[in-house]
Amino acid sequence: MTDEVNFQLDQTKEAMMLAISHLEAELIKLRAGKANPHMLDGIRVDYYGSSTPLSQVANVGTQDAQTISIQPWEKNMIPVIEKAILAANLGFNPMNNGEIIRINVPPLSEERRRDLFKIVKTEGEHAKVSIRNARREAIDGFKKLKEDGLPEDEQKHAEELVQKLTDEYVKKVDEVVSKKEEDIMKV
């Protein structure tokens, strides 16, 4: 295979890996009934006039399976962090004792589990679409290379390799989604 074909294959594989990474990052934010510091990853706080991720102004961790603790580096940040958590509309009610903010993660209701199940499926479909788009771009690239002199048998072989990659990564998406679904449905 030519260098151009190998380069195209590497780019396609990288795009597919990014789709999986993005899916995993999105699914980490979904709560599955137990406390996870990543649930607060999207929260930004006003830190002296600039919007800053929560993890850069406080230590975020879990005390137990149902409690997230947030220890700000500056005590004057406690009300700002509480306001940001409430504004994020995650369904959490932060409590503080003057030094640490605690969030109790309530168990999921059956209805909320079903809603999360749908969100997980949707995120999985978005990842599959990204993977298929990477496949389409690779095949278009191979067609252009054929116009520039790539032999047809090499083009077909490269397209078969891309299809195998696509099948492999779609299977990975299904595995990630089913693992998260099991986690959500666990009572």
Image (spheres, helix red, strand yellow):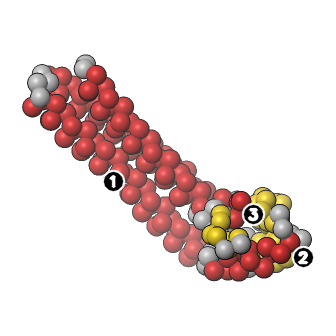
CA gap between label 3 and label 1 equals: 36 Å
| Quadrant in which the C terminus is drawn | bottom right
Is label 3 in contact with label 1 (beta carbons under 8 Å)? no
Mark 2–mark 1 Cα distance, whole angstroms, equals 46 Å
User: Camera-side residue: 109 or 83?
Assistant: 83
Query: Would you identify the image quadrant in which residue 77 lies?
Result: bottom right
Mark 2 and mark 1 lie on one chain; the one further toward the N terminus is 2
- The kind of secondary structure element at disc 1 is helix
Q: Which residue is mark 3?
A: 57
Disc number at residue 51?
none
Task: Measuring from the top left, give residue 31's x and y in whole percent.
Answer: 63, 64
Question: Residue at image x 28%, y 42%?
Answer: 135
Report, in whole angstroms, how far the alpha carbon at label 2 lies from the one at label 3.
18 Å
Q: Which one is nearer the viewer's eye here, 32 or 185? A: 32
Instruction: Report which residue position mark 2 lands on.
Output: 97
User: Going by the image, does 44 lie left or right of 60?
Assistant: left
- What amino acid does circle 2 point to? Asn
Residue pictured at 41% horizontal, 38% vertical: 14
**On screen, 11 above or below 85?**
above
> Measured along the vertical axis of the image, is residue 126 above or below residue 151?
below
Mark 3 vs mark 1: which is more N-terminal? 3
**In this rendering, would 151 be left or right of 8?**
left
Residue drawn at point x = 90 percent, y = 76 percent: 97
Q: Residue at x 18, y 22 (%)?
A: 154
